Image (cartoon, rainbow, N blue to C red):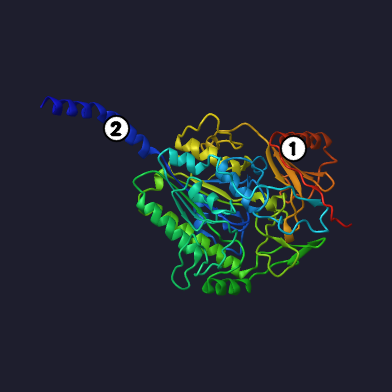
């Protein structure tokens, strides 16, 4: 009897502490991170597209905060994705090009520079955002495109994700967007099943199973990356819509051997954008129906600019105008991204922020919003955007890029860049010439101000060089096979 009394006494004494611990866990916000592949800044209705239809994303934009000056950490996919997961600049990770890059066939004789060897994976020693959340009691899931490791040991399930659906080394769907998918990490669906639908189904199922505890769901759509494959009924819809469009001017312009698209007019691509939008809407509806809307942070963005250039005209998916160029470039079209963040009762609906932010900021922001303490030795290049989300300023800081590669048939050249305040400087590594733009007032980057403002040019160039040294950025070298 005495022992029973002691047991009851201990339980009664510990109940308040148990309740407090349980309350702390329950109060942690859920996080749904939605990443779209190759989605351009102007591919969405709220950002000016008149051809693509994105009512669900436009609604999401009205329900949270729009970041007007948000950037990817790199103009191509793998480095940008590594930065999101690690919170570090691609240059610091020495993962600076899409994996595997052109290392298998070497530099072309027309390319003045050759690329340094870069890593083909995000090292397991990196303490990822998924690992940090998992250690804090979150259930974690990855669904979709990973592309941050050539070998299976670097796949999502070894980087902090409890569940991996579809994530592997491939940068595009090996079997296309309709089942069978030819993806070892994703079982085939019914005949004709659409990949974008399937990945969303998987995430919704994960949320339903884990609705009673904090979760981190990372939905990384393969869409809208090539190949352009839309649902037939939607393709038909956009072909008919295209016939009613009244575009002015030429469809393409040309610089050197590269074509630049001036209109959004690809029915398959528009159909893919709409399917992606529908699935964002389905996911948000599920969160609402499960009663999780007020305790779920939703983040929506892209990994690099839309593919708007090519050395041929028959397969350019989109136009990023008024932004210059596209994927593979450090002009705005290659790195400026849509970014929406919604958290009802915390972030004002219909709000916007024009502070420059970048892909390395997601990690510290999510950790900050979740109230998680990181190990003291954990190094992050990004900053928490929590003050901006709550309409408080943060200190002005430079944002950097390092892309020492040629972007294949897209036309981009090895370069680095820095943005500070209104100004962005780009340095081109072939001859180290620089260009300076006031991207706040010249979003199309038409007016190079480097000669007009030499002091500003020198200031930003010195910042860029100092940063490259600090992160040990690897520079390209002279191509021994180059022929003028």
Counting from the top left corner in percent of width and height, residue 473 is at 71, 40
Give the residue displayed 22% in from the left and 30% down from the top: 11
Disc 2 secondary structure class: helix
Determine whether 260 is above or below 88 in the image: below
Q: Quarter holding the N terminus?
A: top left
Q: Quarter holding the C terminus?
A: bottom right
Counting from the top left corner in percent of width and height, residue 167 is at 52, 56
Counting from the top left corner in percent of width and height, residue 411 is at 76, 58
Which residue position holds label 1? Answer: 464
Determine whether 209 is above or below 223 in the image: above
Counting from the top left corner in percent of width and height, residue 175 is at 55, 68
- Counting the numbered discs, the total is 2
Q: Note whether residue 422 is visible.
A: no
Residues under numbered marks 2 and 1 in contact, where contact means CB atoms less than 8 Å apart: no
Check disc 1: other Cα within 10 Å, few if <14, some if 14-19, many if 20+.
Answer: many
- Using the rendered view, name the quadrant where residue 283 is placed: bottom left
Give the residue displayed 67% in from the left and 59% down from the top: 307
Check disc 2: other Cα within 10 Å, few if <14, some if 14-19, many if 20+.
Answer: few
Decide which of 119, 320 is in the foreground and name it.
119
| Left or right: 308, with 211 as reference point | right
Disc 1 secondary structure class: helix
Decide which of 114, 227 is in the foreground and name it.
114
Which residue position holds label 2? Answer: 18
Q: Give the Cα distance between marks 2 and 1.
A: 51 Å
- Using the rendered view, name the quadrant where residue 469 is placed: top right
Decide which of 251, 360 is in the foreground and name it.
360
| Left or right: 213, with 484 as reference point | left
| Left or right: 294, with 328 as reference point | left
């Amino acid at each position: 009897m005495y022992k029973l009394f002691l047991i009851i006494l201990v339980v009664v004494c510990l109940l308040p502490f148990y309740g407090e611990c349980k309350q702390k866990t329950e109060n942690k916000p859920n996080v749904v991170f939605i990443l779209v592949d190759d989605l351009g800044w102007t591919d969405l209705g709220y950002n000016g597209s008149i051809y693509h239809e994105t009512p669900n994303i436009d609604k999401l934009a009205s329900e949270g905060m729009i970041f007007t000056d948000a950037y990817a950490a790199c103009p191509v996919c793998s480095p940008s994705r590594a930065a999101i997961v690690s919170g570090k600049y691609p240059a610091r990770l020495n993962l600076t090009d899409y994996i595997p890059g052109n290392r298998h066939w070497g530099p072309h004789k027309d390319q003045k520079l050759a690329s340094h060897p870069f890593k083909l994976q995000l090292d397991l020693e990196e303490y990822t955002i998924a690992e940090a959340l998992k250690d804090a009691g979150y259930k974690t899931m990855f669904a979709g495109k990973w592309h941050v490791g050539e070998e299976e040991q670097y796949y999502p399930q070894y980087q902090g994700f409890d569940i991996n659906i579809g994530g592997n080394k491939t940068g595009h769907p090996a079997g296309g967007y309709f089942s069978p998918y030819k993806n070892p990490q994703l079982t085939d669906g019914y005949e004709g099943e659409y990949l974008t639908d399937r990945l969303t189904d998987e995430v919704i199922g994960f949320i339903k199973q884990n609705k009673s505890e904090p979760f981190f769901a990372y939905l990384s759509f393969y869409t809208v990356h090539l190949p352009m494959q839309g649902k037939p009924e939607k393709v038909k819809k956009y072909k008919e819509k295209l016939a009613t469009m009244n575009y002015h001017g030429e469809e393409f312009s040309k610089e050197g051997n590269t074509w630049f698209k001036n209109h959004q007019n690809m029915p398959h691509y528009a159909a893919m954008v709409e399917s992606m939008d529908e699935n964002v809407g389905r996911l948000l509806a599920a969160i609402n129906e499960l009663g999780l809307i007020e305790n779920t942070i939703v983040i929506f963005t892209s990994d690099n600019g839309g593919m708007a250039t090519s050395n041929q005209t028959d397969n350019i998916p989109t136009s990023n105008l008024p932004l210059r160029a596209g994927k593979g470039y450090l002009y705005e079209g290659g790195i400026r991204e849509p970014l929406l963040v919604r958290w009802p009762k915390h972030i004002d609906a219909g709000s916007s922020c024009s502070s420059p932010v970048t892909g390395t900021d997601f990690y510290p922001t999510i950790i900050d919003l979740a109230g998680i303490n990181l190990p003291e030795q954990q190094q992050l290049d990004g900053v928490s955007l929590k003050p901006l989300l709550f309409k408080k300023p943060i200190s002005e800081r430079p944002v950097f890029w390092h892309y020492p590669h040629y972007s294949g048939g897209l036309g981009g050249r090895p370069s680095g860049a820095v943005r500070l305040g209104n100004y962005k400087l780009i340095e081109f590594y072939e001859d180290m010439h620089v260009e300076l733009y006031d991207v706040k007032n010249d979003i199309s980057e038409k007016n190079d101000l480097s000669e007009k403002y030499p002091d500003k040019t020198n200031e930003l160039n010195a910042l860029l060089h100092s940063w490259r040294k600090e992160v040990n950025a690897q520079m390209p070298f002279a191509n021994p096979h180059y022929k003028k």
